[in-house]
Image (tube, rainbow, N blue to C red):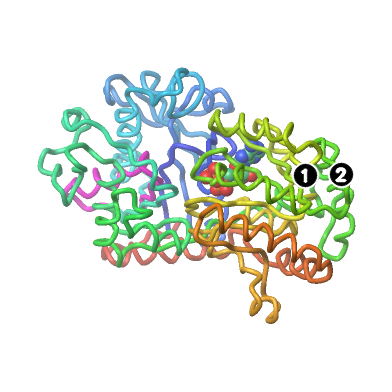
Amino acid sequence: MRVLSVTSELFPLIKTGGLADVAGALPAALAAEGVAMRTLLPGYRSVLAKLGGPTEVARFAELMGGPARLLAEGPDLLLLDAPHLYDRPGNPYLGPDGKDWPDNAQRYAALAWVARELAFDLLPDWQPDVVHGHDWQGALAMVYLALAERARPATVLTIHNIAFQGIFPASLLTELRLPAAAFTMAGLEYYGQIGFLKGGLAYADRITTVSPTYAEEIMTPEFGMGLEGVLQMRAQDLVGIINGIDPAIWNPAKDEHLTAPYDSRKLAARGQNKAALQARFDLAVAPDAPLFCVVSRLTTQKGMDLLLAALPELTAGGGQLALLGAGDAELEAGFTAAMTSYPGQVGAVIGYDEGLSHLLQGGSDAILIPSRFEPCGLTQLYGLRYGCLPVVARVGGLADTVVDANDAALADGVATGLQFAPVTLAALRAVLARAMRLYRDRPAWQQMQQRAMSRQFDWTRPAKLYAALYRDAIERRGLPASAA
Ligand code: ADP
């Protein structure tokens, strides 16, 4: 079976969030399921600079305002080289002023248009059985294909975060090669504008998101961000598949970022990592103080404002916080100031540091994730694998992957962390107190750590689920699947 993945990010070439990790991991994971995946990615300046020697496989005289070429790097990576759209510095989506690039509609419509051409006969020797688009940037491929009125592959659209929807003025319809007939409530139209994600959700054969709970949540007004209606209509075609993590990169027994690597039988070695962290974050080097960590974008989505407000209780209970993150200026300033207010108990590093994020998982007792919404979440999965017990809001993928240490779960020996709900300051305070109480029961805490570390969250299961979904989408369209 052949699948074309259409994405705006791909680890390790270009990453701003979890989408890059998923798009990067899927091809290898799916190969084991007999799926041959090729990935179509914009030829951003920084990406082309990293490539060896891509070869030209197709040309477009005119694509959304200029000439373009399709390049191939290795057997499975296709890059859309369109200098007028992608030859720019910095972030894929934002200009140097921190605002969206003004031509983002054309930039990602072009990507989707080329996916459409690949789905037909742009390459004489390779046509996909399925086109799998990611987020609003890949969503228009679903629309172009559905409107093409010719035999086409099956289409699948994955929502990684419904907060980003790709909404643009209706005046762009013709320029974006979209027929006026599709500008209806059942199609592309979204409150008088063009909704890329909305259109994709209306036209894709199948829709996925990155956890079963988030799949349920986005059908409600609280989480659907205006798209709950269209998702309710597509409920039969919507499924949640939890992301995997790479067990080679996230392995506490072989992690070069740790002071002392360890496994679940040698948990005592975590103490050395904890001491290293306490020194690095200017915290009191106290082996018995419950050390909470945060590795996160500093935003209200992540509940970081609540955590800031809960610091009096966290510190009064004898807890410590080591925070690594960057984001909203106000939150950055808040956590920086907290270092002065709670010397030796609160430490913060403002910035992005992959290595330090590993040490935080390997040395902290618990990781705090008080998100207001969380489509899947990765840091709780790393936490489980590292015995850094996740203390999480009961939303989205957090609800699906952490088993709360309530009395029944403790008695049954199945708890792997703590959950709290609703996402309020009072509930966060209560869960922090509960975590610190549990921590004092060292044998019980250690059992939870060992159990958490034994949970499997690699890509084996998600890959099987995606492969089954592709097969189902092909069958429903009545298409035969190609052999490879
Ligand atoms: P989101 O994609 O919403 O930001 P996820 O939990 O799905 O949240 O993924 C975040 C990823 O980014 C994780 O791999 C996490 O370890 C990493 N990360 C976030 N902030 C930092 C940081 N400041 N330094 C290092 N890694 C970070």
Q: Is residue 427 above or below residue 415?
A: above
Number of residues whose C-alpha sits closer than 10 Å to that of mark 1, classed few (under 14), some (14–19) or many (20 or more) = many
**Could you say which is closer to the camera, residue 279 or residue 181?**
279
Residue at x-position 73% and y-position 45%: 321
At label 1, the amino acid type is Leu
Q: Are marks 1 and 2 in contact (CB under 8 Å)?
A: yes
Most distant residue in the left direction: 181
State the mark number for residue 359: 1
* Mark 1 or 2, nearer chain start: 2
Q: Looking at the image, how many numbered discs can be counted on the residues?
A: 2
Q: Is residue 29 magenta?
A: no
Number of residues whose C-alpha sits closer than 10 Å to that of mark 2, classed few (under 14), some (14–19) or many (20 or more) = some
- 349 on left or right of 197: right
**Could you say which is closer to the camera, residue 461 or residue 286?**
286
Q: Which residue is mark 2?
A: 259
At label 2, the amino acid type is Thr
Q: Is residue 183 above or below residue 108?
A: below
**Residue 299 coordinates in the image, percent (x, y):** 52, 39
| Quadrant of the drawing holding the N terminus | bottom left
**Residue 374 coordinates in the image, percent (x, y):** 50, 52
**Residue 316 coordinates in the image, percent (x, y):** 74, 50
Residue at x-position 70% and y-position 65%: 452
- 39 on left or right of 275: left
Residue at x-position 51% and y-position 65%: 464
Picture quarter containing residue 156? bottom left
Which region shows up in magenta? 130-152
